[in-house]
Amino acid sequence: MRFALDQAECTEARDGVESGCGAAVCVGTVDVAGHSEERLRARISLIGRAESKLAAMKSQAVAEMARQHNAASAERAVREELQSSKRAARHDVKAAERLAALEATSEALAAGDIPQDHARLIARASSDGPIDEQALVDAAMEQNYDEFEKTLRRQQQDLSGDDGQALLDRQRQKRTARMFNNRDTGMFILSGEYDPTTGQHIAAVVADKERELWHQEDPKARRTSQQRMADALAELILEPEKGKAKGIALVLVADYDATSRELVNARFSDGSPLPMQELVRLALKADIFPAIFDAKTQNLWLGRTRRTATDAQRIALMVRDQGCIGCGTAPNRCFSHHVKFWRNDGPTDYPNLVLVCNDCHHDIHDHGFQTTQDPDTGRWKTHPPPDPYPDNGSTTWQPAHLNSVLLN
């Protein structure tokens, strides 16, 4: 493989990855000022493929260094030649060694057919247990990161032989947390890695506290979402007497198989798989809310009698949308949005509600994004306006007031 750095070698590759220079990676320098959205998207796509090919070249070189010498030598070379941190170098070497054993993944990455992050997910999963590599590569070519991550987790569980319980146990063993002062900023940093069950539970409790704090805020002087999360964590840890926010802490979902008369396909509200044994264990806890929803018995149609969604509606939306319909943010960090705005007489009915995060909610109210439903799958999505700045003399769309957006 060769990376063409000489501009003269890339004169014929301004709109392609390989043409004209015989290289695995060749992207000519182009002044993109004034380019149309279509051309800019094409340029971004081209660069994405080039990044994948470069990642494959780097991985091969690092893996060969480790093979000829050892992992420590490869780490030292990466740190010195790329001026990266010790942690990043170790991560690169581990990923390279894993990819070296995955022929289909390595080939797809080298061809620019899958993104680097997707390849890293496959490589990491291969160290946790059996995988169907080709099926994952095929999925990686079609799915975005969030979709692919769920596909991979589901395959891991299906191939585990124990419903994913052993994988969950290993993840629990790998839990870690760090607390330290950042010498550059003087700020205190807290970070942690948890197994999916513990992480989902922590996230749900913090999100409940965030919603409580949001309702207590002055609408004209709101905190940022990051500030609110920091304050929620601090209050939960330093002021436990206040307790966690009222509401549902964790939502678990399972299907009922009428043939076998048992629950199957256990998962969290965002679709992440969950071992059935873990579902049973969690369902016995006091702060877990197991529920079966029947549209005929649950009061999910409130009309104009209430503006905000009820707990039953929120849970039903979490199960249906599995997160923000715009960007995929976790469902417990989302707000319920009226597709037909409340101020336009939109009802607080389940079919008229969708989950959106704070940013996507602002996109809808302040930037004219539209919500549409796929007639085949029933899934909701957000789309930017076709022309947010029309120049044909038509009346331009006017955004709602910023502080009123979370009420709709």
Image (tube, helix red, strand yellow):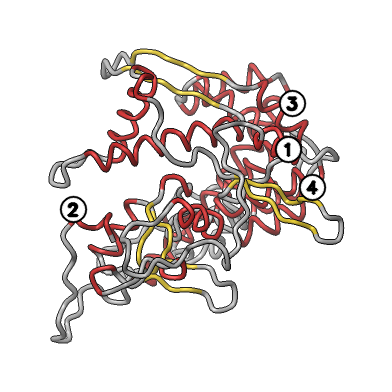
Disc count in the image?
A: 4
Whether pointer 4 and pointer 1 mark residues with C-beta atoms closer than 8 Å, the reply is: no
Disc 3 versus disc 4: distance between alpha carbons?
33 Å
For the residue marked with disc 4, what is the amino acid? Answer: Asp
Q: Residue at x 78, y 36 (%)?
A: 129
| Dot placed on the residue nearer the N-terminal end, 3 or 2 | 3
Which is in the foreground here, disc 3 or disc 2?
Answer: 2
For the residue marked with disc 1, what is the amino acid? Answer: Ala
Q: Please give the label number shown on residue 158.
A: 4
Disc 4 versus disc 1: distance between alpha carbons?
25 Å
Residue located beneath label 1 in the image? 100
Residue 171 in which image quadrant: top right
Q: Is residue 159 left or right of residue 152?
A: right
Helix, strand or loop under label 2: helix
For the residue marked with disc 3, what is the amino acid? Answer: Arg
Vertically, is 4 above or below 275? below
Q: Please give the label number shown on residue 403.
A: 2
Which is in the foreground here, disc 4 or disc 1?
Answer: 4
Helix, strand or loop under label 1: helix
Helix, strand or loop under label 3: helix
Tell me the crowding category of disc 2: few under 14, some 14 to 19, or many 20 or more residues within 10 angstroms, Cα based.
Answer: few
- Compare residues 87 and 348 and report the one nearer the observer: 348
| Dot placed on the residue nearer the N-terminal end, 1 or 2 | 1
Residue located beneath label 3 in the image? 67
